[in-house]
Amino acid sequence: MDEMHKCRLCGKQFPESEMSEEHYPAHCVGNDDIIQLNIVKAMDDLMSGHARQAIVSGMKKGLSYEDAAGAYFDNELAKDLYPKGRTARTLCRECNTFLGKYDSAYLRFYNANGDPAIVRGYQERTKIQIIKSIYAKFLSLPETQDENFDFIEFIKDESMSVYSGEWRLYFVKRDFSTDLMGLADIGTGKLDFEEGVVYELSDDRFIFNLMNFEKHSCYEMNSIFDILNRNYSLIVGVGENGGYHGQVMLTDLFRQMQEQDERREFFP
Ligand SMILES: [Zn+2]
C-alpha cells in the first residue's frame, strides 16, 4: 500500500500519488537547476589564489570577467544538487493548485525586483497574495516539517488580510554583499537562537527569513508587510555583518567541512 502523506496546508492524509511535486522556490524564480556551491573549495581556492588564476586564464582566452568567473564556478565549484529544481511532496494537488494564484502575484513582485515605485501601484489584494505566497513556500522546506505554523488559516482563507500570529517574515534584495563572489547560492537553512528559530529560503533575487521572534535590530531587513505601506522602501543587501544569511552560509560551510573530514576518516 502507498505510504500516506499529510498535506501541510489542508492537513488531510493522501497517498503519495495524490501529492503534488511542488517547487520551492517556484520554478519561474530561479528554481530550475539548483547547484550547491562547494564552499570549502571556494575558500581554499580564494586563499591559494587558484580562483584568481582560473578566472584570469579564462579572461586571457577572451572571456569577460563575468563569463570567466561563471565558467570557473560551473566547472570547479558547482555540484548538481537538484538538476530538475528543488521539489518536495508536502502539499496535496488541490492545495498546490490553490497556491498557484498566489505564486503568480509573487512573480510580478519578483519581475519588478521589489521596486517600491511599481509595488505601490499594486492592488491591496495582490500585495496580500504576494505575502501569502512567501509564507506558503516555507511549508515545503525540509527544515520546517516538524513545525506547527499558526499562519495556515491566513494562507487558506483568501479573504483574510490580517495575520497576527507569531511568525514574522523578513526579506532583503540580493546584491554583492549577500553572495560569495557574486554567485547566488539559493539554499535553505535553519538557525537556532535563544529567542527562537530562523528559517531561510531564497530565490535568484531575494532572501527570506521566517522567524518566531522580532529580528535583532542590528540586521536591517524589510518586513514582508512593509509592502502594504505607502512609504515602503526596499532594503538591499545584508551589510557588513552579513545578517542571518551570512550565518546560514557559515553554518553550511562548517557542515560541508565536517562532511569532508568524516569522508577523510573513512577514506584517508
Ligand atoms: Zn491539501
Image (cartoon, rainbow, N blue to C red):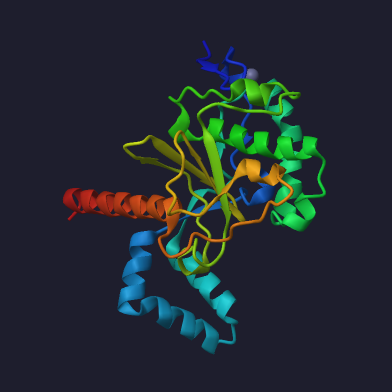
Residue depicted at 55% across the width and 35% down the height: 138
Residue 235 in the image, given as x and y percentages of width and height? 59, 57
Q: Is residue 263 above or below residue 58?
A: above
Residue 162 in the image, given as x and y percentages of width and height? 67, 28
Residue 255 versus residue 59: which sits nearer the camera?
Answer: 255
Residue furthest out toward the front:
231
- Quadrant containing ligand 1 reads top right
Count of marks overlaid on the render: 0
Compared across the picture, whether 204 is left or right of 130 comes to left
Does residue 163 appear anywhere in the picture?
yes
Q: In this view, does 98 lie above or below 5?
A: below
Where does the C terminus fall, quadrant-wise?
Answer: bottom left
Residue 179 versus residue 19: which sits nearer the camera?
Answer: 179
Residue depicted at 33% across the width and 61% down the height: 40
Residue 229 in the image, given as x and y percentages of width and height? 71, 45
> Residue 159 occupies which quadrant of the picture?
top right
Residue 214 versus residue 186: which sits nearer the camera?
Answer: 214
Residue 90 in the image, given as x and y percentages of width and height? 56, 26
Residue furthest out toward the bottom:
60
Residue depicted at 30% across the width and 77% down the height: 48
Compared across the picture, whether 15 is left or right of 158 comes to left
Q: In this view, does 235 lie above or below 89?
A: below
